[in-house]
Amino acid sequence: MELSKEFEQKFRSAKSVCVLTGAGVSAESGVPTFRGGGDTTAVWKGMPFDQISSARMVSENLAEVWEWFDYRRGVLSKCTPNPAHETLAKWEQDFSEFTLVTQNVDGLHARAGSKNVIEVHGNINRSRCLGCGVRFDMDVGSVPHTPVKCNECSGNLRPDVVLFGEMLPAGVFEEAVEKAAVCELFFVIGTSALVYPAASLPEIAKRNGAYVVEVNPEKTPLSELCDESFRGRAGEILQEITRVF
Ligand code: APR
């Protein structure tokens, strides 16, 4: 894999680095992506995933939503972090200012050792009370989910994941925007860049002068904006970059 002189210079000199990841970064761990590359799980019991994973479904049929999420939690519990997750956890140590923003709810970045992860779409191993808003961490693979009711107010619990038709949790995205706006080097890894506002982060970084690098086997709507695109699998490419330095 050829690394341009400009990329080498940026990677060597960068003090502040920000990374946005999507489902593609977990594809090599066996986690199905939603749209491109890897196998997709578009349908659950005849419903498209953006119907079963919707705020409307939580109000109409919470039990069905939990069955779908417990199924996904079961699949994910058998998955382990891959070299892409591990490399990003290492980069967190190497760069003085390093921020990892993920759209993934699988928790694999944290399981790989990343500490400073902004989960803009929530986490599948956490639930939230519909009544009082208290959050509960669930052990990876603890299917079916527990607790079933809120220990504080006995309210119903829902997955602490951003569902279709919902806003991102307050403050979380704003923190990601702040980091994207001041970084010198921005990586966008394994995302189809179709879902906003997450897909706006590379644009914000670019507008503020960052060098933007895409890692994806396929072209995306962001490719034109990027200063450099590495076409291939994240696990291999990130290891290759680290090997060079
Ligand atoms: N390495 C890097 N990229 C990969 C790999 C890989 N091994 N395998 C697939 N990809 C790329 C695909 O080419 C595609 O561009 O990962 C991208 C996955 O795109 P999506 O499935 O659309 O996932 P993502 O962009 O994360 O979706 C955003 O949409 O469904 C919602 O909330 C969900 O967070 C998700 C959001």
Image (cartoon, rainbow, N blue to C red):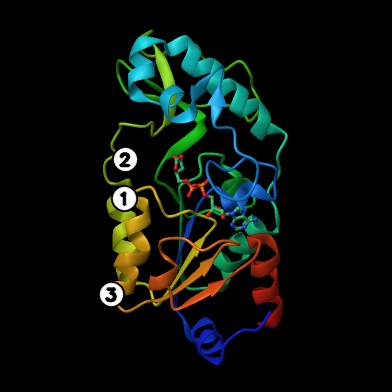
Q: Is residue 10 visible?
A: yes
- At 57% across and 62% down in the image, what residue appears? 216
- Tell me the CA gap for discs 2 and 1: 9 Å
Note whether 5 is above or below 14 in the view shown. below
Percent position (x, y) of residue 42? 54, 32
Query: Measured from the top left, where is residue 179 in percent x and y?
Result: 34, 64
Instruction: Measure the alpha-carbon separation of dots 2 and 3.
Output: 23 Å
| Residue underneath mark 1 | 197
Check the picture and name the quadrant holding the N terminus.
bottom right
User: Does residue 177 appear left or right of residue 217 in this picture?
Assistant: left
- Amino acid type at circle 2 is Leu
- Res. 149 visible in picture: no
Could you tell which of marks 3 and 1 lies nearer the N-terminus? Answer: 1
Label 2 belongs to which residue? 168
Q: SS class of the residue under badge 2? A: loop
Q: Which residue is mark 3?
A: 208
Circle 3/circle 1 CB separation < 8 Å = no
Q: Secondary structure at mark 1?
A: loop
Tag 2–tag 1 contact (CB < 8 Å): yes
Residue 234, horizontal then vertical, whole percent = 63, 61
Q: Quadrant of the C terminus?
A: bottom right
